[in-house]
Image (cartoon, coloured by chain):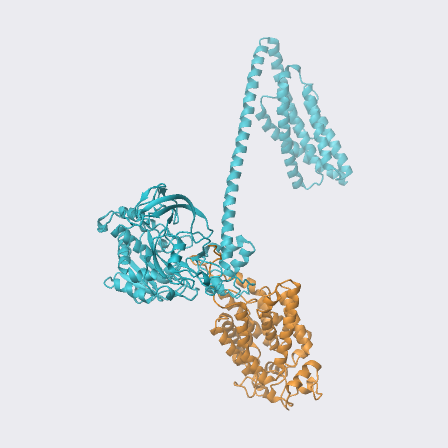
Amino acid sequence: MKLTLSSSPHMHNDRDTSQVMRMVLYAMLPGVICQGYFFGWGVFIQGAIAVSTALAVEAAILALRKKPVARNLGDYSAVLTACLLAVSIPPALPWWMTVIGVIFAIGIVKQLYGGLGYNLFNPAMIAYVVLLISFPAAMTQWMPPASLHAVTLSFNDMLHLIFTGFTQSGLNLEQALRPMDGVSSATPLDHLKTGLTQASTYHELLTSRVYEGGPFASSGTGWAWVSLSYLAGGLFLLKTRIISWHIPISLMVSIAVFATALHLINQDIYGSALFHLINGSVLFGAFFIATDPVSASTTAKGRIIFGAMIGFWIIIIRNFGGYPDAVAFAVIIMNMAVPLIDYYTQPRTYGHKGK
Amino acid sequence: MQLPQFEDIISRLGKGQTWSFSGGVHPLGNKHLSNQTCTVRPPLPEVFIVPVRQHIGTDGKILVSEGDLVKKGQPLTQSSQAFAVPVHAPTSGTVIAIGDHVTAHPSGLSETCIQIKPDGHETWDSLEVSTNYTELDKRDLVAQICNAGITGMGGAGFPTHIKASGSKTVEFLIINGIECEPYITADDRLMREQSASILEGIDILTHLLCPRAVVIAIEDNKPDAFEAIKQACQSRSDIHVIAVPTKYPAGGEKQLIQILTGREVPRDGLPIDVGVTMFNVGTCFAIADAILRGKPLIERIVTVTGKAVERPGNYWACIGTPVNHLLKVAGYLSDKQSQPEVIMGGPMMGFTLNDAAVPVVKITNCLLVPADDELTHGSNERACIRCSACADACPVHLLPQQLFWHSKAKEYDKAQDYNLFDCIECGACAYVCPSEIPLVHYYRKAKSDIRVERDERNKADKAKARFEARKARLEREKLEREAKHLKAKEARLAATDNKASTSSKDKVAAALARAKAKRAEQSATADTKVDTKETAPTANDNKKAAVAAAIARAKAKKAAQQASQQGDSSPAKTADTADNTADNSADNTVTTEPPQDNVVDAQAEKKKRVAAAVARAKAKKAAQQASQQAETPPVQTPDTAGSAADNSTDSTVTTEPSQDTVVDAQAEKKKRIAAAVAKAKAKKAAQEKNK
């Protein structure tokens, strides 16, 4: 009897890479739907553009690199990167900017570094930063939540806006996104940043309409709900052990600590911990961006340092830097530190003396 | 790290609490497949194949030969030393062959096996029974355990008598009934069916080792076995029966020690270093069988399971039963396997057999015959996504991912920095890897490569040492030979001298020559001392050597000047020329020596050359140092000094053949002086040049 040989272990749990990626995509759903509800069809259209571009670019480069195309596309990593980017960019961003972003993310940041598992940086965040630096105006053109819109935008309007720059009725981006009277089109973080330069205090600014209607006093109507939906998705990932608690928890704790410290120093300028946690993309970033396994630290201690330092940089850049939000920059900065962190946070092996 | 103290551990165990180890996985147990029915004794196979070695250690001496009739339990080999245990005939019958046969080994190696054809009578040849073992000398008891061929039944097959005869104090005697590998239920059934015997074995071990506490650990997925043991130990307050939460690999020795005592076995240490000795429940049973019933270890429970057998269950299999016999008994379903596969051991750490004719050995606890869809093989390897699920699963806190990178890239020193050799190959990392990377396979490969490399390095080192020893010996012999020849020559010379000395004229000549030589030596010394004078003293006509040296020096200087005029174009060549000139003049000097020195001449010539070479080398070194210190660029000037030194040495040597050690020292001194002089001159020359 000829017997086949294989190496132990002969058992394997039923979680593979593509399943991990799919689970993360599912976990994004509440956030994405919520984002769509508050900010219109744009996020779905951007998602479609990004995913199709990502698959095309990934397939092309895999073919060039003579790697099995179907098998690698089937791991859903490109789809996930595309979706992460799509929810990070303004919903009405011209389509070609999205395409450029995705090409950069997949083609350069991921595939040129060797494909899945070899990229040093988070592809979606690099693409986001590239777009932010290249097209600062368009990338900060966030529309106010739909309920505050002067004009209601249908799916077709949004489609036209993204692909031609005009709605069906001929409104350009500026006009289409114009909010109701008395409301700034800025995001809550933007509003604070610009407001502070105009000699208003944090507490004065919190009374403006941007921050009305949300679940908390310091959050706008749509933003907080979107953040909380992503938090829900993140908790699902924690529950299913797709991600470990280290990075998101340490990131949020560090945001809370540093924001509170600054807030205590000067309440007129620096926002509270809650303000910083709920606004912008901190919760999304904590659970979906910073936990990207490829570019994050791999040791338990390292992940805590990694998350905490991202939180630190977010607070620093938000309060002292030029950009209203800082998750992308903070993540990229810490991506660079990962090899160092990993090296110095090796766990003590069983039976070895502590170092 | 502070070790948990005995009292703390006992109070904790008393409350049913345990420690835990980090990592680990929870694979599907599938134990229900095989633990539902009682252990069955299969019919005798056509032939038993008993490997001579079944454990860690060395083979015993074979006691039988082909054609011999053996009885059941009769020793087939004899323990010749501490690390060997005997094997016994599993049944009565005829030895039909002794030779190589494929055995249960991951690489399918062949080993010496004794093949026995059963006669069907099962005639016993029992061992000595010692029911009153407490009255026996402990050494005799240990010897009985050894003679019964008992090795660890849990996995590694470490000879039991060695562990049972330790001299160190045992705080905890741990009895391992964890059986954490999925599918395997051999210990489970044994504990349910033979709890009394297991307890007897424990008592024997307790008698031998005198532990402060006995702990029986059973995973909580075996409630029936736990109850059975608990029942058996009802009246025994000294034995703690502990239910351990199910987690693979809780049954690993180090992991179980950590769970029960909170202690870690040091890296290069043994469990006894933290006061623990551990035995498998199967081993306890075998000890009781051997000591109380005189049955050597000739059978064990083997779980035959998997969905490709019709009657999965446990079987009392004699050691030496071919695997295919057991498969037949259990009802192998070939249609459930598109590619036949049999795993010996569990699905996590077991290995696939390459031949079903291999025999069951003392450590065979399971034969797993999976149906096609039963086990998921991680054969679909993809790129690592650095998710570190492996690190979270590792029970010994390694970083499997880093180990994988370095093992795959063959950066073995780095892999060792990440403690590759602490890996216990439990397979938890590969089990959880979402990219289905066969991590353990990479580690095994790396480990074996490193071992091979280490062996080769050792071999190479030995070869080098051998070669160098040989070289040294040859050198020594050569020198001895030369010394002998020299002696012989001197003896011959002395003989001729004696003959010559018969004439007083010759004696006078010799005295003259000696005097001359002395004077020449003095003048040579003087010459080097009188450094400012360019011309050597010429008063004595026997100062030819000195003159020649002076000429050579002058020539060298001239050459050096030329060289420095030319610049740095060919310093080495110039220096060489200077050397040659010096040598030639020295040679000339020799040829003009008085005739009575003729005999000495050849010898002197040789010695002079050697001495000259030595002096030259030394001078060169000195010159190099000088040039480094002085930072005077022209290299040729110091070299000239070297040649000058040569000359003076040469002249001395030629005139003083028999005192070459003295000459050497003098030459050394002179050379130094000469070098200093040359340095000064060089400086001067350089200054002039600068002007």
Which residue is at the far bottom?
Answer: A181
Quadrant including the N terminus of chain B: bottom left
Residue B104 in view: yes
Q: Which chain is cyan?
A: B
Classify residue A114 as left or right of residue B338: right
User: Which residue is painted at 55% across and 27% down in the image?
Assistant: B479
Q: Quadrant of the C terminus of chain B?
A: top right
Residue B279 appears anywhere in the view: no
| Chain that appears orange | A
Picture coordinates of residue A319, whole percent (x, y): 59, 76
Q: Image height check: is B139 above or below A132?
A: above
Task: Give whichever of B440, A256 is nearer the camera.
Answer: B440
Q: Residue at x 63, y 72 (%)?
A: A54
Front-most of A298 and B565? A298
Residue B71, percent across and down?
A: 30, 46
Residue located farthest toward the top when viewing the structure as drawn: B503
In the image, is B384 to the left or to the right of B179?
right
* Residue B687 placement: quadrant: top right
**Quarter holding residue A289:** bottom right
Give B106 or A206, whichever is nearer the viewer. B106
Q: Where in the figure is residue A103, as x and y percent of width and height? A: 66, 71
Residue B601 falls in which quadrant of the image? top right
Q: Is residue A76 above or below residue B537?
A: below
